[in-house]
Image (cartoon, grey):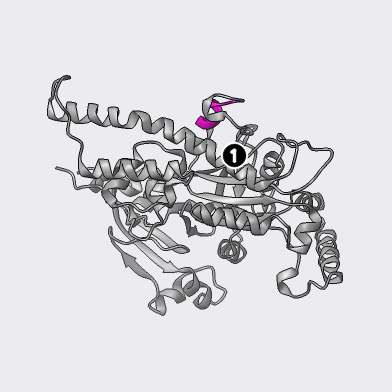
Amino acid sequence: MPPKKAQKDTSALPLSAKFARCKNTLSMGFVGLPNVGKSTITNLLCGANHAEAANYPFCTIDPNEVQCIVPDQKFKYLVDTWKSPSIIPAALKVVDIAGLIKGASEGAGLGNAFLSHIAAVDGIFHLVRAFESDEIIHVDDSIDPVRDLDTIQSELCLKDQSVMENVVNIEKERVRKEKGLSRSADVPLSETFQSAFDKVNKLLAAQTPVQTGSFTEGEIELIRDWGLITTKPQVYVVNMTKKSFIRKGSKWLPKIKEWVDSHGGGTIIPMSAAFEQEYADLAGDAAAQKAFLDECTAEAAKLGLKGPGFACKSVIPRMIRAGRDALCLQSFYTMGPKEVRAWTIQRGTLAPQAAGVIHTDFEKGFIKAEVCNFEDFKKLHGGEKSVAKVKEAGKYRQEGKSYVMQDGDICVFMHNIAKGKK
């Protein structure tokens, strides 16, 4: 009998990650009402940091799905050290999902098509509009991001409630087949199932995402198979005017924070698509970009807003990192004279699974991983394109099948596929 495949260490993961699919190619999707800036911000995310790896295929996957390069100073250091001809950074897939309207859970607008698009992603950028514009109409004719948050959350919870209507019947059918019971027989449901079912319904009735609840490991295993939208992690993004972004304030931000806190909490990122677009339009001219940021910072200073906290800069890198963090993704690196590459894995991934991201044969025939910590490499390599001095310092180690990968590990995997097939 072949040995059991190693499982991830999920003990340190947040609840939303435990509900997630076990794969390394996870995606974030923009969700919001029409005309809140989803497509503009998706395009801005797609255009970020492309200069770091000119040979990487950054083209849009299709009109509403893009790859966003992950800002990573560790990777940049390795690239600068090795100067390899092939440079492949980590990327986050982001999907621009069509605008939702009230009644979507019952088929209004794109209805079920819209909700199926949300079901296909693994995390949500929940985008709300906090800017006035005579040129860009609001679907409800007025600006009220708290109302919009209620609309979106309500539709997502209503959709999950409709899913829950069939959960009991599906579970009974599963138990019936498992125990060989007849159609007329009374099918017993486990205490774990009933507890999970009741907890989820209580959360949804309160318009609260399921991923903010408290569940046992057994309940999580059951809920994962129900395919609920509100088990996905959410990052709240507030699209403000350029002026409000420069001032680092808006009358809506305290109200939005209060709403988010009362609905399970979460990361809130204030930003301005208008500001980001102006900054992006200057791409390729570093001096012009710096002048633009300095001008905006000076404008804040005129209002008495001084200090590092009021220095203007793009929040696009922060958004990409926040999306990646919400999905519990991290990087390990391979490096050499031919290529420097960042590989994406989920937190808790074991060494054989990480090796399998490079090639399935590496996992099947995994022998060991030779690993060094990025900070040790940076401190010890002495400018050399080699780990020789890291080895001399005793900081280059061998790890086996139970090793839990750490963010920023630099790795070489040893494998023997012939051995792995036995």
Residue 374 is left or right of residue 95, and the answer is left
Front position in the image: 173 or 199: 199
Quadrant in the rendering for residue 405: bottom left
What is the magenta range?
A: 110-116
- Quadrant containing the C terminus in the rendered view: top left
Residue 34 is left or right of residue 421, and the answer is right
Who's the residue at 79% across and 71% down the image?
305
Residue 180 visible? The answer is yes
According to the image, label 1 marks what residue?
151
Residue 61 horizontal/vertical position (percent): 60, 35
Q: Is residue 51 above or below residue 421?
A: below
Front position in the image: 302 or 152: 152
Instruction: Please tell me whether the stretch drawn in magenta is mainly helix, strand or loop.
Output: helix
Instruction: Identify the amino acid type marked 1.
Output: Thr
Residue 160 is left or right of residue 215, and the answer is right
Q: Is residue 197 above or below residue 274?
A: above
Q: Work out which residue is located at the far bottom of the displayed protein and give it.
A: 393
Q: Is residue 227 above or below residue 412?
A: above
Who's the residue at 54% across and 77% down the image?
382
Residue 219 horizontal/vertical position (percent): 29, 46
Who's the residue at 31% across and 64% down the image?
399
